Amino acid sequence: MTDTKSSKTAAAKPIIFVPEGELDGADLSASQRAWAVSNGFSGKSGSLLALPSETGARAGYLFGTGSDVNRPVLIAGLAGAGVDAERYALKGAVGDPTRAALGFALGAYRFDRYRQSGERPELVLPAGADEGEMTRLRDAAFLARDLINTPSNDLGPEAFETEIRRFAETNRMTIRVVVGDDLLSENLPMIHAVGRASAEAPRLVDLQWGRLDAPKVTLVGKGVTFDSGGLDLKSAAGMALMKKDMGGAANVLGLAHALIDAGLDIRLRVLLPVVENAVSGKSYRPGDVLTSRAGLTVEIGNTDAEGRLILADALALGDEDEPDLMIDMATLTGAARVALGPDLPPLYATDETLAADLAAAGASWGDPLWPMPLWAPYEAMLNSKIADVSHVSGNAFAGSVTAALFLKRFVTKARTWVHLDIFGWAPEARPGRPFGGTDQGIRAVYQVLKNRFG
């Protein structure tokens, strides 16, 4: 984890932020300015140039922030990813100091559970930065990234429960876990059906925090620790990243940490259905009809669309509490990636004003979301001839929309519902997002909830 220090900056080397074309305004010696010019440094977005001292030692860095047009909010993350493991202070055209410090920290993330990555850079907080805000958002992101990056042999359903229990203890949350056949007796049948083929039993984890009479906020996260596709088996290439299929649950935990650390006045409930979608004689099958917690019968069209089944039972459970706001996060559909790519999760909401607020907060904090329609005419694509609903459509159209429409059927009492169809993975490094498991939706949702309940 990248350290941040708020002590004096005397020993810190500067990283001088320079907008494109504004090198003349940077605080440099004549020899350093000549060095920058000779190396063609112009402030181009993401460019990093080591600065020599008068003795030839490295004195710091120049960092290009580019032009104002389309500048990433967390561009400082590129600096955090590129500098050596020393102590730094951000100087020059830093912009918002909290976002700059957060971007630097997020860019310097390393996953080192299995391989040592060496020392990490330290950062002296720039003047005016909110250390508490930066730290909680950094820690929330790192929690999600660490969980997603951990392979399934070390994070199956049982190990994931252990991690969640540790999280609950750290954050002073109550916890209740329903495991295996107890899911049937407690009317969570679709979670049981999806996870029963695994050697490790499926489970539903229920976490709660906050005063009982505060506004109710319920978070639901898809926790598929590995997705083989079930009997509709994925290809080898399709399985390669399926350790990340619990990314919804990981991001929900990161968000919960931020909300609790900020002390928001809410009654927070976190529901995590945790399963492995495996193959055995106990596997659920294409053509099966499952009865959901909500009482709706569901025809199974494809066992590789398991996430929406476990979410449906968890959403129905959360809905019974009539929350003011219920939000789910899930690595749900490939269709979302086809439509919007890996960096821009679709956002579905029953409240258009809330959707606009979430999109604006995401744009402001480098956590983009894109509002998508809950287009009611497409519900006909989920018609079944033998059950109340099919859980997949019979064609390749609007896959992310129809998945959201399926989930919406299980939310009838919550005042407002939001669904984020996230990817949870950075296929290549971006500002503030190194390659690998990544946070999505945490900062956007956190900022909106802080504004409403802070």
Image (spheres, rainbow, N blue to C red):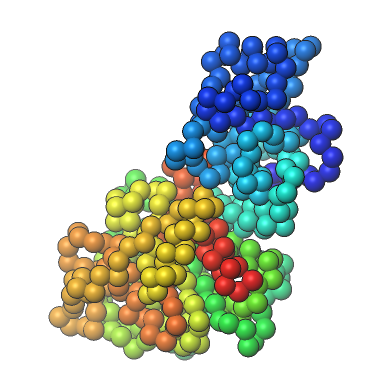
Q: Looking at the image, which residue is at 15% across and 80% down?
A: 385
Between residue 267 and residue 381, name the one nearer to us: 267
Residue 98 at x, y = what percent? Answer: 66, 49
Residue 253 rendering spot, x and y as whole percentages? 58, 65
Q: Quadrant of residue 19?
A: top right
Side (left or right) of 228 relative to 396: right
In this rendering, position of residue 9 left or right of residue 157 = right
Q: Quadrant of residue 24?
A: top right
Q: Is residue 330 visible?
A: no
Whole-percent x, y for residue 2 in the image: 69, 44
Along the line of sight, which residue is nearer the eye, 339 or 157? Answer: 339
Residue beneath the point at 73% across and 36% down:
89
Q: Quadrant of residue 143?
A: bottom right
Can you see residue 344?
yes
The structure residue drawn at horizontal position 53% and vertical position 45%, both measured from the top left corner, is 73
Q: Which residue appears at 48% of the width and 53% of the height?
A: 363
